[in-house]
Structures are given as structure tokens and as C-alpha cells.
Amino acid sequence: MVVGAILMIIIGYSYHYMMNKFPSAGGALTYTTKAFGSNHGFLCAWFLGLTYVAMLWANATAFILLARAILGTTFQFGFHYQILGFDIYLGEILLSMAMTAIGCCFCLYRKKLTARVQVGFAVKKM
């Protein structure tokens, strides 16, 4: 946790520096492209894409653990397989896929609502 906190402080400081240097709106890709050129920007975009793909499955599996803690064995039907002693059930896979689809629909069709929720979470964490 301490190492993660130190890394987040470094990342936050870097974003603060880039926001002051390039005051227009932007993110990692924009700042990388402006500071280091399009080749580095392209590389940054690829790593961002890999990060987003990795976060998708990580959050989907974390949702299953949350559902198990709150709902118990409700979605533990249709035993499917086992990984490292952890049972994976078909019901949990379907729940994970449904939650991912619902999240995608909100992002695609309810953009204003999604933006408000994200800003609300960001403000609440501050």
C-alpha cells in the first residue's frame, strides 16, 4: 500500500506539472504527444488501451466477490470450472457479463448521467 501510495503521488505530481505546462484540456495521451511527440503518444495510447482492457476483467471478477459477500450463494449455480482452488460458476459469469453490458450501455446512451456520476465520485473522494 505504501509503494502504491508513493507511485500515485508521483503520478499526481506529474499530471500537476503537465497541467501547468499545457493548460488546455487533456490526459495522458495529449500530454505525452505534446511533450514527446507522436511516436511516444502512440506508445502511450497502446499502453492505455492495455490498461483499460486489464481493468475490465479485473473489475468484472471483483464484482463477483462483492456479489458473493452480499448475496451469498444466489448466483452459484451451473458449476463451470475451478482455478487455483477457486470455484467459478456459470451464474456468476452471467452476472459479470450482464453488469459489464449495463455499464457499457450507460456509457454509450446515458453520457450526461455517467459524467455526473463520475464527477460525483471524484468530488466525494477529495
Image (tube, grey):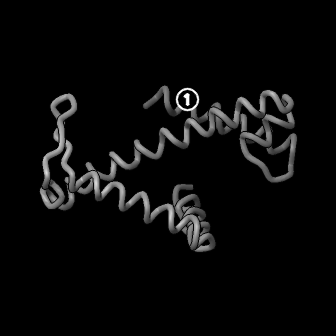
> Is 37 on the left or on the right of 29, as rendered?
right
Q: Amino acid at mark 1?
A: Ile
Q: Quadrant of the N terminus?
A: top left
Instruction: Name the residue at 40% across, 47% down.
Output: 59
Instruction: Name the residue at 74% across, 40% down.
Output: 29
Q: Quadrant of residue 57?
A: top left
Task: Residue 10 in the image: state x and y as whole percent.
Answer: 64, 31
The residue under label 1 is 6
Task: Residue 90 in the image: state x and y as whole percent.
Answer: 21, 51
SS for dot 1: helix
Task: Residue 30 in the image: state x and y as whole percent.
Answer: 79, 43
User: Nearest the camera: 97 or 23?
Assistant: 97
User: Nearest the camera: 16 or 54?
Assistant: 54
Instruction: Name the residue at 20% across, 28% down.
Output: 84
Disc 1 crowd rating (10 Å Cα; few below 14, some 14-19, many 20+) is: few
Question: Height in image: 3 above or below 60?
Answer: above
